Amino acid sequence: MQIGLFSPAEQTKNATIPADLSKIVFEDTKGNQVSLADLKGKIIFLNFWATWCPPCIAEMPSINKLAQLYKDDKDIVFLMVDADSDFGKSVDFMNKRQYNLPVYKAVSSVPEVIFGGSLPTTIVLDKQGRLSFKEVGAANYNSKKFTNFIEKLKALKD
């Protein structure tokens, strides 16, 4: 399944997330916790997905390619948040498809401005923690337009 409808663009206004970022916490498969506040100063690619979600599955190859493009860039962090919080299924999913994406689960409440419950949902926060991009539904993140968008965020002063 391929996805073609997608037009990334910086939002007309960078909205600062109203909630305290230090309270938004995710946990990886090893039990390490990270808050969005811990990641301030980095560009955060945050994707909410599930193994049973066809649009999530459809966009995953493009996310994997994007992550591989930036795998050595310490200023960009990928958080793939399993909406079901089932590490067994999500890790098996990633391994079976040979995706090298870090799986997390939310261990705190997540403000609706970040995730309103629709899958997949992808947001990008800039280095200041401002919401710079939000897409609800499947998209192709392995495109020149999206990598140009990421590069613009990288070029912004801290």
Image (cartoon, helix red, strand yellow):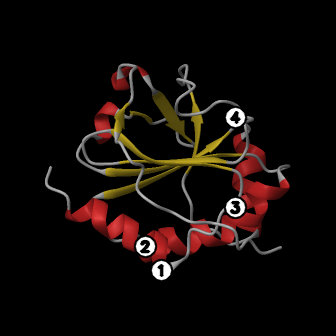
In the drawing, what numbered circle is on residue 147?
A: 2
In the drawing, what numbered circle is on residue 85?
A: 4
**Residue shown at 51%/63% (left/top)?**
8
Decide: few, some or many residues near mark 3? Use Cα within 10 Å; few <14, some 14-19, many ≥20.
some
Which label sits in the foreground, 4 or 1?
1
Label 2, label 1: how many angstroms apart (C-alpha)?
5 Å
Left or right of 148 in this view: 47: right
Decide: few, some or many residues near mark 2? Use Cα within 10 Å; few <14, some 14-19, many ≥20.
some
First in sequence: mark 4 or mark 1?
A: 4
Circle 1: residue type: Lys
The quarter of the picture where the N terminus appears is bottom right
| Residue 61 spot, x, y in % from top left | 67, 71
**Disc 2, disc 3: CB below 8 Å?**
no
Which label sits in the foreground, 2 or 3?
2
Q: Which residue is mark 3?
A: 94
Label 3, label 1: how many angstroms apart (C-alpha)?
24 Å
